[in-house]
Image: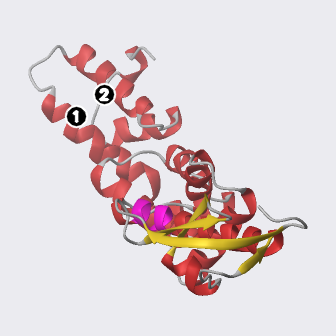
Amino acid sequence: MTEGGVHRVSAIERQKNNPGRVSIFLDGEFAFGLDEEALFKHPVHEGDELTDAFIDGALLADERVRAKSAALRCLSRRAMTTEEMRRKLEDRGFSGRTVLRVIGDLSRVGLLNDPEFAASYAASRMLQRPCSRRLLVQELTRKGIRGEDAEAAAHQAYGPDGEQKTAVILLRKKMAMLKGEDPRKARNKCVAFLVRRGFDWDVIRAALDAAGSENERDIEV
């Protein structure tokens, strides 16, 4: 190591277990590894003298490359919200400024788009496992979707018919599954089922009326 914060590149070797990265040796000792993309942005050759500032910049560029690769691997498995991606990258130890930079890059090219994610998630949820508007909004906000985007996605997913039609459809399906059971117990199970799906009692009562249920006053909730 030379004095004054300047270090001479003594060797550059391609890593055997990761051909896309190279090992940089300074003053005869291994110093750090760089991805080829980072190396392209911060060229290094044997015999070069590197300042601490140059090394810091190269390492930051390398971290961004690694963070971007990690983010793309995550997105290849499933779509994510901006908040989910932030948590994922921070959990993997990437610095805050790198996380913000990568999220910004992914957002600019449309790979992170919270309103689109919310709309897609809401539509899929209502198709596969319908629930109340309130529960749907709660799930979206837990994923990091802003309140206004969550509300808009829920409104779009429900369409003009609203919660009652959804509750009626679910109720009829559940009642068909419980056919043959004691009517009172079956109705109680149906109510509990709708409660778990997040529906309020006024919606449940209206659904019971619409589905032709009788004696709903006897239902235990």
Badge 1 local density, few (<14 within 10 Å), some, or many (20+)? Answer: some
* Up/down of 213 relative to 54, above or below: above
Residue located 46% across and 45% down the image: 132
Q: Is residue 59 magenta?
A: no
Magenta region, residue range: 69-75
Residue 126 image offset from top left, x and y in percent: 36, 55
The answer for how far apart the CA atoms under marks 1 and 2 are is 6 Å
Q: Amino acid at mark 1?
A: Lys
Position of the C terminus by quadrant: top left
Out of 44 and 48, give the one closest to the viewer.
Answer: 48
Answer with the quarter of the image where residue 104 lies.
bottom right
Out of 83 and 47, give the one closest to the viewer.
Answer: 47
* Up/down of 193 relative to 185, above or below: below
What is the basis of the colouring in this image? secondary structure
Q: Does 100 sit left or right of 165 as displayed?
A: right
Q: Magenta stretch: dominant SS?
A: helix
Residue located 58% across and 54% down the image: 89
Badge 2 marks a residue whose secondary structure is helix
Residue carrying label 2: 190
Out of 125 and 87, give the one closest to the viewer.
Answer: 87
Residue located 60% across and 80% down the image: 46
Position of the N terminus by quadrant: bottom right
Q: Is residue 200 visible?
A: yes
Residue 105 image offset from top left, x and y in percent: 61, 78
Q: Amino acid at mark 2?
A: Cys
Q: Residues at badges 1 and 2 in contact (C-beta under 8 Å)?
A: yes
